[in-house]
Image (cartoon, rainbow, N blue to C red):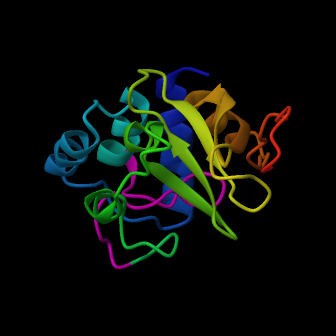
Amino acid sequence: MTDDEIVELVRAYARAHELPPPAPPGATAELEGIVGYPMPPLLRRLYLEVANGGFGPDGVLSLTNTGKWYSDEESLLQLARDFRPDPELPNLLQAPPLMTLGCAIWWHVDFSTPEGRMWGWDPNGRCERHRFFVERFTLVQWLEDWLEGNRAFPQPPPVVDCPDC
């Protein structure tokens, strides 16, 4: 699918599910200033042209507070403002959380990659060094999968020779 096709499909979903209106333009610049990288272009378009959160398999966080929460967090901006990165996991800062699946499991999107490489966070079966892991797909592929009716879960790669996992 092209970005335009994804935007149109998410727009139809947003109308059908009465998602919040698009985010204010300054919110993306503020988040990018905190993260230190530009938001992946497709994600920027979805927030600014379609809806301020709620799209995706379990509803991505709103960029700003809409009064309707899609996780335990008010907004992606507030989460980024309050975030204190773990020195053991430097990639966390460039890949802010995007959506929670519950049980402390999150999807993250990597702003340092234009295509928005996806990351998983699952502390339930991993040691501190391996609970944050790169996924095998990008934001576009993740959204395409959801739009085709699938719901993926983070799939950590096998960890070899880690006595703590």
Q: Quadrant of residue 99?
A: bottom right
Give the residue furthest to the bottom. Answer: 67
Task: Find residue 14 and report its horizontal and vertical position in percent.
Answer: 50, 56
Q: Magenta stretch containing residue 57, yes or no?
A: yes
Relative to 139, residue 87 above or below: below
Q: Residue at coordinates 66% horizontally, 54% vertically from top-left?
A: 57
Residue at 14% x, 48% y is 26
**How many discs mark residues in the rendered view?**
0
The quadrant the N terminus occupies is top right
Q: Residue at x 57, y 29 (%)?
A: 140
**Left or right of 26 on screen, residue 2:** right
Q: Give the side of residue 42 with respect to residue 122, left or right.
A: left
Q: Position of residue 109 (x, y in %)?
A: 50, 39
Task: Provide residue 20's location: percent of width, then percent of height.
Answer: 38, 65
> Whole-percent x and y of residue 51?
39, 54
- Residue toward you, 46 or 94: 94
Quadrant location of residue 64? bottom left
Front residue of 83/77: it is: 83
Q: Is residue 55 above or below residue 158?
A: below
- The residue most toward the front is 163
- Is 138 colored magenta in this rendering? no
Q: Magenta region, mostly helix, strand or loop?
A: loop
Q: Magenta stretch: give its range.
A: 50-67
